[in-house]
Every structure is written in structure tokens, then in C-alpha cells.
Amino acid sequence: MNTVTIQTSMLKLKPKISAFTRLSTEVRQSSQWVKASGSSTTDDVNIEKLFVEKNVQKLLTDLTDIDLEHKVFRPRRTSIQQRSHFALMTDERLEKTRERMREEARRFLQFVPVKEPRQETVQTLAKDAELKDFDTSKFVFTDITFDATDQDRTVVVREPDGTLRTANPEEHDRMNRTYYQKPNRPVNPPPLFSDPYLQQALDKNEHEFVLDWSCWFYEPDDPAFVRLSQLIFDRINETNKFHVITSTRHFGSFVFYLALNDNIPKLLNYFGSFGRLSDCANLIRLQKAVKPDWRVTIAQGDSEEKIVKDFIKQNARFRDQIGDLLNFINNGKVKQDQDLEKQTFGVRERVGRMDRRKARITSANVRGVEGPLAELSEEYPVKVVKSEGSGERDAVEKKDEGRGKGRWRSRDQNSKEDKKKD
Amino acid sequence: MASLLPLVQTRSNTVNFFMRRSGPELWKTLTSVSKSGQKKGRRNTRQPIRPLNRFYRIGSSPMKVEFAGLNAPMRMNQDQGLLSIAEQTEDEIRDSLGGVKKILEEKDTGKKKRNREKLHPMERGFSGTQLVGQKLGAPPPVDGVDFDDFETYCLEVKRTSNMTNVFGRVHTMSALVVTGNGRGLAGYAVGKAPIHRTTTAIINGMGMASRKIFHVELHEGRTIYQDFYAECRNTRVFAQRRPRGFGLTCHPRLIKICEAIGIKDIYVKVEGSTKNYLALTHAFVTGLLNQETHQQLAERKGLHVVEMSPSRHFLPQIVASPISVELKTEETLEALDRLNLDDFYGEGRYPLRKPKALPFFSNLEGHLDARWRKHPFRNQESTMIRLIADNMVPRWTRDARAAWAEQRNERMTTGVEPMPLGIGLSHVVPKKED
């Protein structure tokens, strides 16, 4: 394809062209997010609108639990070397800071938008037969006025046969890239986004990394992005690796995708295995909100248990997929492997080292079995030397510092304290 | 009675100076210096005694003379005489001509063999083959306590002098030695010995350092707990805590001390005298010993010590909380407790921060011109990386690139790939057929 690119500012032409493009979204038939194998006939549903609906968003946010320690703010590699900060805090202050971090985490976990892929079809704007064979190349006209964004930028192509048409998504992206380069967005998609490298990454539980990178590389309405995220979501669901995507910004679209395709039993089972009944109920509510003509009925005042039990009763065909959930509902038993899964996640980040730094002995547990004496603490009472006012203590310390035996004595005291701590 | 005197050898020639004097006497004229000459520094102008007998053997002159019983076997029949002149082959003549040179060369190779074995660059000391700065191993055991896992470094050897009533100026070798096990235990001392006994001084210092062991608490076993300032004499030390993997960025002597103690990440700025190594060591160790651990800090302040790590996006994590004192609340907090911890420990002192001086050539015309000539190629490296990453060019060698260009050319001439044409691109001019 030979092209000649010309940047223009076509303010007059714009309304006409955008009218064309709007028309194209309305005539869309079925959603790319709904798999054809699903027996449902809800083809005319608008996924984009459904995803941003208030109750759907609320259910999705409730389902995405925020795990600060192990997921959202787990130790990651940073680009610059920086030492950690230390601060003195009271309980109130600490709680306030944690609350701020939770707020930050909510901002971090803002969902990736679920959008329909852009249409490949183009509109013919004009056919000027007299311009036929004006050149051997196509001419691409791009609007680079200040207020044109990458999404609504007008790009039109004059074919050598005289036809003037709107650009297809690929041409549009190329023109965006030509005039407004983005860092870390090279021309060719990285090999990670295709097998076998993709499968290798997923085997190492790097789902979040791949999804984050694809967000960085593609626009959310890029057909390749939609295809890739569906592929990853399917593989997560197949292999039951839900722990890799919980507490991430992709969990919302993941659950939404499962609910759209009537594919929730495995996730229900996952929630059930941890005894998270409210999450189970929310998931069923979400399925109902996404598919109003689903045959499970949910009344307004139903309790969570009733919703889940109703679902189990009416979907006997899923019985073998939701063993853990049934075990929880009937016997109240919970699989205790939640922490284990969290530790196996993200091996290369070396979580263990960071956790060792945390204070394990506090005033609350010095006297207990958790404290320095362990089991012996039941036989011997642990005594903690109370200091009389901080000022005096300082004075004593200052006297002891300096030289000679005094220093040794103060160190002896310290080592005694250390022994108590250990 | 026959006298024994005729048996005593005497030199009959009294005319020639060289015949008149014995060998040692002759050598003395070359090698000796008078007392006053010594004071005037003539010692170095004298020659060493040369072993002449090594170069000139009896009978090995160009005319080869064989003395029976001396360099040839004794012969029983007397008629041949006591000495004979042997025939020489051409090889022997050649050998004898270059004989002196050959012996001298042999001597040289002998010297090379005496060279010490080479140390690894990481184990070499501060300078040359000197012991200063080298790893010296563990100090000897004291009272049944052995220091197997200790490593010793000598930081300095110098000659000190003292004026005495009886002996005048007395010189002493003094060695500053640091020893440590790399896990917080360390000791340093000054060892002394008489002049020129460098090794003795170091060994004395090792023994003393192993008796003066102190313990330093290390944060995460790798760095200091807080930034500190310490001073001794005219040496001021500003030490700063650094993240994992930073390494030791400090005075070379302090690097050795840090290695002995086991500090792995630190930045230290030394101001004032940087050559008084004893003061430097003392200041640094004082600062280390005056540190407090997080637990001690929590006890003293009655507050949680919270770590906010950048790798966790500054999520607060309690590192220590007071055990023996009550936790303070917001109401009982004093103004001092609200101070930033880093400011609090520096005692208001900060090291001088100088911007790095530009090299002298940075503004020279030639340099600027060279930079401008390189300017068109500034993106070449990233393009190379991108092309290799996208698997366009297998390897960045001339051959691989030429093959790639050839392949593209072929694809364009056959029409598989379109020729990039248009505004801003150069024209394609077909080659002239001559």
C-alpha cells in the first residue's frame, strides 16, 4: 500500500464524518464479548452501556476485594532505587494512613473499560471519477488540530481510483502513531501477546503483567486487545487460577465477561471454597443483572444464603463443578489454602523477604505463646521492665554512652532487651 | 734448621698496584665509604662487589689452556708437561665470546623467578604489593576463643617518631588494623613495632584488635539504622542509609571497615581531614555505636515505627512498636515527636553537596563540534534494539544487515512489498546500465 500522508485541519469536514462513524456503531449486530457458543439470543444488548450501569459497577466493585498487603501493594520492582521511609506513628495516625492507602488502592483498581472492538468497515465519503489515476499512491489526510484526540481524530483516505473514504482502524492507529508517538508503544505488538510465549507467561502466573502490558500497548477498543483479554480470561477460567486476577483492575471485566457468557460456576466455587457467601450472592446477582431473562429468580428481600441455595437448586447441571461451594453450604467447611495461594503468587517478587521485616513481637503478644518464650510462656510469666518516664531514660543512656565500661554496660542492657524481644 | 719461611707465599711483584694488593683490599676501594662520606650521602655512589670469578674461569680464555690438576685431569706421564693448549672448535669460540652476556642474562631470569605470585585485583591492597588494604585473614585465637570467621584489614602503616633523652629521635612503625566477622562484630586497634618491622606492627595490631571487639546492630543485616553525623579531631563523617543493592560508596578506608563489620549498602561523605585514618575510623565507629534500633526508638518515643517502602508504594508497615511503655495518642504527642525522622537524626547538619564539575573540554569548540556531528545518529542504538527485538534483523552484524537489505530489495523488485514513496521520501532512480 503506497500512501502519502498529509496533515490537515479539517474543521468543516468533521461533523459530516463523525456523523458517518456514529451511524456505524448503531447498526452493529452482535457483541464481540458474547461467545457464539452461548445459547442465549440476546444479541442486541449494548455491552458498553451495560458495563457502566450503576448497579453492575457496584456489584463488580464489591466482588473485587482489595488486598493491600499481598496484591495491590505487594512488593514490586521499581525503576529507580529509593530507600524506604520511616516514620513514628500513633494508632490513629496509622489508621488514617492505611485509609488513605485504601483510597489509593481503589483508584489503582479502576476497571479497564469493556468496549466493543472498532468496526473494520469504512464509509465512502465521495467518489470522484475525474480524479482516477491521479497518482500511484493513496493520499491520507489527517486532522492534527490541537483539540483532536486520538479517538475522534479525522483520518480520510483518497484512493488512487478517486474514492474518498474514512480510514480503517489500522490506518487510524498508524496516523496517530505518526504524528503523536507514545512511549513504549512500538510498531509491532510484542511476541508475548501470542503463543507460545503467552502460554509460558501464564504458566508462571504472570497474568496480571500480561494484561497490564496489553492495556499499555492497545486501546481498549482495539480488536486485538479484546481478543487477547478474552483468551487470557478463558485460560484463567479453564485452569481455575482465579487468585492471579483477584484484587486487580482486570477482575471487573473478567467477572463481567464470565457473567455475559453464562460461565460463573467455577468462580462461584472459588468464592465458596473460602466461605465468601456474600460474594457468591453478588455474583449471582450480577449474572441476573447482565442477563435479565435468566431463569433464576431473585426477589428483593432475599438473603444471601437463599440466593445461593436457589441457584444451586435450579442449576443441578453444575453440581460437579461446585463441590467446594456445596461443602461450605452443607457442612460449613472452608478450604484453608487462601494464604498459601497468595504466597505462591508472583514468585519473582520475593515476598518472603519483605514480610520478615515486619514486627512480630508487640506489647500485645509478648506474654503469649506468640512471644519470645513461645510455649515456655505458660510456665514462666514474661516480665517487661517499665521505664519511668522517657526523659530519665534518656539521661541514663547519655551517661552510659561515651567510653570504657559504661558503654559495655549499656550494651549489656540492650542485649538483655534483645533477648526479651527474640 | 730449615726455616718454614720459604713456604709462606708472598707476592714478589711490588711494581703493579693491582698485583701488590689483595682482592678484598682492591674491592674496598670501590665499595667503602668513609664516615664523613656517609654523612654526605656518598653511600649510593659506591659499587657493589662483583663476583668476577663467575665470569672468568681458569683456562676458559679464547686461548684454551689446560692446567693438569686444575681444569684438566692429572696425567701420570711427565713428558707431556703440566699445561697444554687444546684445540678449540668454532662453537666454543662463539660461546666464549658471548659468555659474559649469557651469564648476565641468566642472572636476570633468576630475578624474575623471585617475583611474588599475582593477587586478584579485588584482593590487592591500596597500593602496589604493600600489605595495606589487603585481606590478612583471621587473628590468632585468644584464651580459647578463635576468630575463624573474622577477616582483618590493615588500613595504614606509618612511621612515627619520638624524641628521647638517651637515644635521640626514636622511630616506631605503627599500623592501624581492623578486624571483623561481617555480621556486626568488629574491632580496631593500633599495633606498634620497631622501625622497618611493618609486618610485626600489623600482627601486633591484629592481636590487639581482636581483644577490642564491639557489636554494631545492622538494619536488615546490610545497612545502618539511621543517617548519622559523627566527628573526631578534624574529621567529620556523614553516613546515610541506602536501599538494597546500592553498595558501598565511601572513603576507601571506610569501605574496608564496612566490609569487616558487614555493612553492604551505605553512602558516607567525609569532610575535613580525610587522611587522618585513625580519626576517621574512630568517628565512623562512634557514629555506628551511637545508633539506636527501631525497637529502641519505639520504646524511647512510645510510638510505632512504621516503614514505608517504595517497592510497596509506601504502604505503611509496622516495624517495631513499644513493649514496655504505653503507646502515645494524638493528644499526648509533643511537637518533637512530629519531626521528620531523617531531620531528627542529622542534628541539623548536612554534608556539603557540590554539583559534579564539568570536564575541562566540555565547552571547547572541537568537542561541541564532535557532539553536533554525532547528533544525527542519536537514535541509532534504540532503532537497532527495536529491529532486533522485532526479529527484523537476526544479528547486528554487517553480514546479517546486508543480507536483510538484499532480501528487502528482492521483495520490492518482485513487487511483494510496496516501495515506500511519497512526500518527504527520496526518489528512486534506476541504476544506469553502462
Image (cartoon, grey):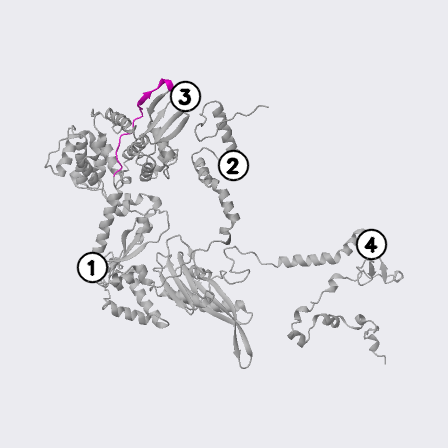
Rendered image: mark on residue B184: none
**Chain of the residue displaying label 4:** B
| Amino acid, disc 4 | Gln
Position of residue A6 measured from the top left corner of the image (x, y, whole percent): 38, 30
Q: Which residue is mark 1?
A: B330
**Chain of the residue displaying label 2:** B
Q: Nearer the viewer, residue B432 or B193?
A: B432
In what element is the residue under mark 4? loop
Q: Which residue is mark 2?
A: B397
In what element is the residue under mark 2? loop
Q: Which residue is mark 4?
A: B88
Between disc 1 and disc 2, whose residue precedes? 1
Magenta span main SS: loop
Tell me the magenta residue range: A111-136
**Chain of the residue displaying label 3:** A
Alpha carbons under labels 1 and 2: distance apart: 67 Å
Residue in the picture at 41% in, 21% down: A134
